[in-house]
Image: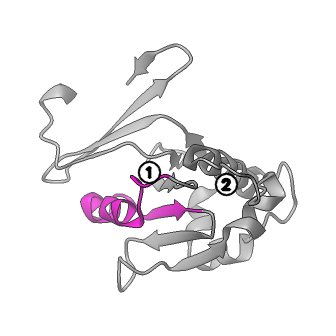
């Protein structure tokens, strides 16, 4: 299959992509820092719609809240879980009083938290673990991996999703 010929209905480049053990998408996430106008929650919700069930969860992180949306919820525009950003990410080093916090920095701290939910490397009980379990996300994260720098293309008939992995330190593209 030539991915360049793929008819794309949605081109997605999230800050965080969580994959399960079979490299299927479990969660896409994006952070919005202080002063970043170009990122908003509607873009993240559009990822759910474009995936048509192939993307089970999306997350939007800003300085106030971590909003998690689920494909099979009654209303895609309403989060199934809202967490206080400072309470969750403060454990991983977030200081909301810092003058400038980028969306990428929020996403980086969120990656640490997600890894902790999977591997319990920093805490036996990571922040908000119960809430993540109650919405059905925690079991999907089990043994999963965080993949930064991913481009996702979705086939219009939803026969497949193409993931392209980028490794910025080498500038190479891996299929």
Quarter residue 105 falls in: top right
Label 2 CA crowd tier, 10 Å (few <14, some 14–19, many 20+): many
Quarter residue 117 falls in: bottom right
Of the 4 image quadrants, the one containing the C terminus is top left
Q: How is the image coloured?
A: one colour
> What are the residue bounds of the magenta stretch?
36-62
Q: Is residue 91 left or right of residue 29?
A: right
Q: Hey, which residue is sitting farthest bottom in the picture?
A: 74
- The residue identified by callout 2 is 114
**Nearest the camera: 149 or 96?**
96
Residue sitting at x 58%, y 55%: 34
**Nearest the camera: 107 or 164?**
107
Label 1 CA crowd tier, 10 Å (few <14, some 14–19, many 20+): many
Q: Is residue 123 left or right of residue 16?
A: right
Q: How many marks?
A: 2
**Nearest the camera: 44 or 49?**
44
Residue sitting at x 77%, y 59%: 97
Q: Residue 12: horizontal and vertical position, in percent?
A: 33, 46
Give the Cα separation between the discs numbered 2 and 1. Answer: 14 Å
Q: Is residue 172 left or right of residue 127?
A: left
Residue 164 lies in the magenta-colored region: no
Earlier along the polypeptide chain: callout 2 or callout 1?
A: 1
Q: Residue 64: horizontal and vertical position, in percent?
A: 63, 70
**Nearest the camera: 37 or 17?**
37
Element under disc 1 = strand
**Figure check: 90 above or below 151:** below
- The residue identified by callout 1 is 25
Residue sitting at x 44%, y 46%: 14
**Figure check: 62 above or below 111:** below
Q: Is residue 14 left or right of residue 10?
A: right
Q: Residue 158: horizontal and vertical position, in percent?
A: 20, 53
């Amino acid at each position: 299959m030539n991915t360049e010929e793929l008819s794309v209905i949605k081109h997605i480049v999230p800050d965080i992509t969580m994959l399960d053990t079979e490299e299927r998408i479990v969660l896409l996430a994006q952070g919005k820092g202080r002063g970043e106008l170009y990122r908003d929650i509607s873009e993240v919700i559009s990822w759910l719609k474009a995936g048509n069930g192939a993307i089970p969860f999306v997350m939007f992180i800003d300085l106030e809240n971590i909003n998690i949306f689920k494909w099979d919820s009654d209303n895609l525009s309403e989060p199934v879980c809202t967490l206080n950003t400072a309470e969750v990410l403060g454990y991983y080093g977030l200081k909301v009083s810092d003058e400038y916090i980028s969306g990428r920095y929020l996403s980086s701290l969120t990656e640490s938290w997600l890894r902790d939910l999977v591997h319990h490397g920093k805490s036996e009980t990571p922040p908000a673990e119960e809430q993540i379990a109650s919405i059905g996300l925690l079991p999907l994260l089990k043994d999963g991996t965080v993949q930064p720098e991913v481009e996702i293309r979705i086939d219009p008939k939803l026969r497949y999703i193409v993931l392209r992995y980028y490794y910025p330190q080498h500038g190479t593209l891996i299929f």
